[in-house]
Image: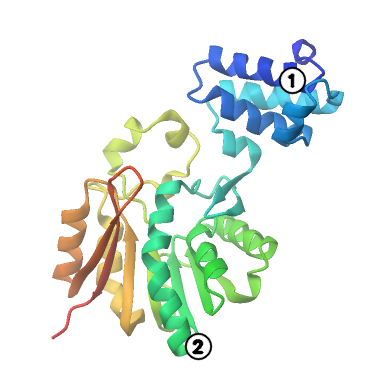
Amino acid sequence: MADILPGTLGPLLREARQRLAAAGVADPTLDARLLVEHFSGTTRTQAIAEPARTVPAEAIVAIDAALRRRVAGEPVHRILGFREFYGLRLWLSPETLEPRPDTETLVEAILPFAKATAERQGECRILDLGTGSGAIALALLSAVPGAVATGVDIAAGALATAMRNARDLGLADRFETLESNWFAKVSGSYHVIAANPPYISRQDIGNLQDEVRGFDPHLALDGGADGLDPYRIIAAEAAGFLETEGLVVVEIGHTQRIEVADIFTAAGYRLADKFRDLGGNDRALVFERAKP
C-alpha cells in the first residue's frame, strides 16, 4: 500500500492528511505534517517552498507505516517517540506518561520559588516524584541554573528515559534518578517536592480516551479507588524530606481541588496558592507547612 503515497512532498502531505481525516483523526492536518516532516527529514518551509521536492522511497515506506499506526489509534507523539514540553524535546518510552501542556502549569507554579531559593541560598533542591520522562524536573533545571533535581520513579524504564533526556539536554550533571516506590528510598531534604501523580480513579480508567487508556502506562494513571491515594502518601510522608520553608506542589485532576486540599490540611499543611491551566481548570496546588 506504500506505493499509493505520492513521491513528492506537497502531494504526500495532502494524501497523508486525507487518509487521517478519513479515519476520523481529530487533527489530521497537524498530525500529517508532524509525521511527514519527521520521517522525511523535511520542514514546513520546504513543504511550502518546494512542494515538488522528491521524498526518498524509504521515507515513503516509513510514513506509510506511521500513518497506519495513527489510523489504528496510536498517539502521534508515541509514533514519533518524543514530545515537546516547556520548549524541550523529551524522548518517550512505554513506561513514561506522555507529558502534556496542562503539566506546564505545575512548572509555572514552582518556578518563582525555585528561582528565588537558588538566588538566596545558592541552590534549589527539587524532588520530582513519579518523574516519568523527567519533564517537570528537567523543565525546572533548564530555567533555573542553580537548581538540582532528583527524579524518583518505580519504573526502571522511565528512569532510563529521564536520564537520556537529561543527557541530551545537557542537564545530566544536575539531575539524578532514584528507583523508589514514592519516598521508600529517598534521603536528604528538598526545597521543593513536586509530583504529577496518578489521579484517575481505578473504575474510571476504562472511560479514558483510547489514546490515553491504550498507550499511557496504567501505573501512571491509577490513583486508587477514588484517585486520591498518591496524595495521601505524599501528604503523610513529605514532611520528613522537606526544608523548613519548602513547598509541596502537586498536579491534580480538575475536580479534585477540595479533596486534595483537605488531605494536605489534615496532614499539617496550608494551601499557599492554586493555579489553573489554559483551559481554566484547577491544575496545580502549592502547599507549605502550616505555622504552629
Residue 151 — which label?
none
Vertical comparison of 9 with 229: above or below: above
Vertical comparison of 47 with 253: above or below: above
Indicate the position of residue 271 as horizontal and vertical percent values. Answer: 20, 68
Q: Nearer the viewer, residue 2 or 87?
A: 87
Residue 40's image quarter? Answer: top right
Vertical comparison of 181 with 280: above or below: below
Q: Amino acid at mark 2?
A: Gly
**Side (left or right) of 118 relative to 156:** left
| Spatial CA span between label 2 and label 1 | 52 Å
**Side (left or right) of 112 relative to 17:** left
Q: Which residue is mark 2?
A: 122
- Colour scheme: rainbow
Q: Is residue 186 visible?
A: no
Please tell me how many numbered marks the rendered image carries: 2
Quadrant the N terminus occupies: top right
Considering the numbered disc 1 on the image, is that residue within a helix, a strand or a loop?
A: helix
Q: Amino acid at mark 1?
A: Gly
Quadrant the C terminus occupies: bottom left
Residue 142's image quarter? Answer: bottom right
Vertical comparison of 111 with 241: above or below: above
Q: Residue at x 48, y 24 (%)?
A: 26
Q: Is residue 120 visible?
A: yes
Q: Which residue is mark 1?
A: 10
